Amino acid sequence: MEEAYANIALQQVFTTWPAEDRERRFATEIIYGVIRKKNYLEWILGRLSRQPLAKLDADVRLILLCALYQIIFLNSVPARAAINEAVEMTKKVSHRGSAGFVNGCLRSYLRKQKEFEIPQRTNGPITYLSLTYCQPKWFAQWAVRTWGMERTEELFAYFTQPAPLTVRVNTLMQTRDEVIGKLASRGVDVVKLAVPEGLSISRGGIAAIREELQSGILYVQDEAAMWVAHAVSPQPGETILDLCAAPGGKTTHLAQIMENQGEIIACDLYSHKQQLIWDNCKRLGVTIVSAVVQDATKENPDWQKKFDKVLVDAPCSGLGVIGRRPDLKWRRTSKELKDFPLLQQAIVERAVTYLKPGGRLVYSTCTLNPEENEGVRERISQAHSRLQPCTISLENTINTDEYRFWPPESKTDGFYICAWENKI
């Protein structure tokens, strides 16, 4: 599970596991809970086990982490029931000695749980941040260096809160008001977002809108991500390139703003992601998109000076979506924060050559790393004097050539958007 994307791994399990919805929800809660709290649970387990965690059998270790999560965080599960279930599961995947080890560790926790106190902020600020908010220690160190202690704790605290469920209304099919009326008639509470097509589902959850999602009337998308298409300012009849497009959320948003008039070329590096773009376009009724396989760092001679607008929603470290994708934080490394800007700059350098004179280039990421955001913008601006920062208008009040979404303030994912105009 640690090596796979959590959502994909769970979907694969559920396709072959004949379980009821209640059991699936319970399993999902435990798996995601263990992923979110991984380092805190391992910190406790490391104090309970005489063996180094790295030497524990992987299945036994996972059973222990799941049981600890249930005991500590799920009031609905009696501790002894969690222990008994963990012991029985261990017997199925290992030997009797391992079952005794699991039983001993978990019962030891019940006796000593008051001893597991996280170090105070004043005694060890990095350890405090890492264990209290369940973030990798390297990330806590980097964040404090970048933003300071107060701002880092503000961000980490926000990441522990449930991510809001926000959706984009597909105006190719229905207006936002029509969708609101339809959902209200079923008792689904919705709130209009500042972005024109956006809604927040405040009661009912994903199950309440499954019909609209399947039919393409709604598309799950964070509010900050919805603003990216508006920053591009697409117009009906234009030719637009979405250079890093999969799975197609921003591509289809561009198309609906264009009223399905014009042409969009949407690319990705892999053919299976190309298929995701096709699938989303079909479901949402988008007919002006051509999905192609293309390495965004490689030249395509047919695209030179061809496009009115180019969007580079670049691959990035994803530090802005850690609250929504808890598995991501355990896969990232500090080295990647230095590697991503090189890739991003190479993609933007290629994108510049595809712009028509007077064309607009928009760069966006879902990270909070300044080197991937302002750093890339500064280096591109210095390298290309013909690229002039141009205004993007967001939320009807903000007119700027770059915008940062800071999650605790914007109540969205962390995002960065900037734009240039090709003056030649």
Image (spheres, rainbow, N blue to C red):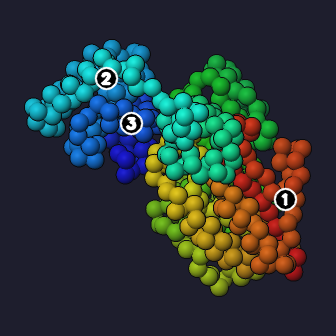
**Residue 301 locus on image (x, y percent):** 65, 85
| Quarter holding residue 158 | top right
Q: How would you rate the neighbour count of disc 3 (Cα within 10 Å): few for under 14, some for 14-19, many for 20 or more?
A: some
The residue where tag 3 is placed is 43
The quarter of the picture where the N terminus appears is top left
**Residue 307 locus on image (x, y percent):** 75, 73
Q: How would you rate the neighbour count of disc 1 (Cα within 10 Å): few for under 14, some for 14-19, many for 20 or more?
A: some
Q: Residue 109 carries which label?
A: 2
Query: Sequence-wise, which precedes: disc 2 or disc 3?
Result: 3
Residue type beneath disc 2: Tyr
Q: Who is closer to the viewer here, 390 or 245?
A: 390
Q: Which residue is drawn at 87% across and 55% down?
A: 400
Tell whether 50 sits left or right of 121: left
Q: In this view, does 423 lie above or below 243?
A: below
Q: Residue at x 62, y 48 (%)?
A: 143
The residue where tag 1 is placed is 401
Q: Which residue is drawn at 80% across and 38% down?
A: 194
The quarter of the picture where the C terminus appears is bottom right
For the residue labelled by badge 3, is the local secondary structure a helix, a strand or a loop?
helix
**Residue 180 locus on image (x, y percent):** 72, 29
Q: What separation in Å lies between label 2 and label 1 (alpha carbons)?
A: 54 Å
In this view of the protein, can residue 329 be seen by the observer? yes
Q: Who is closer to the viewer here, 160 or 228?
A: 160
Q: Who is closer to the viewer here, 126 or 364?
A: 126
Tell whether 85 sits left or right of 305: left
Residue type beneath disc 3: Trp
Residue occupying the far left of the picture: 96
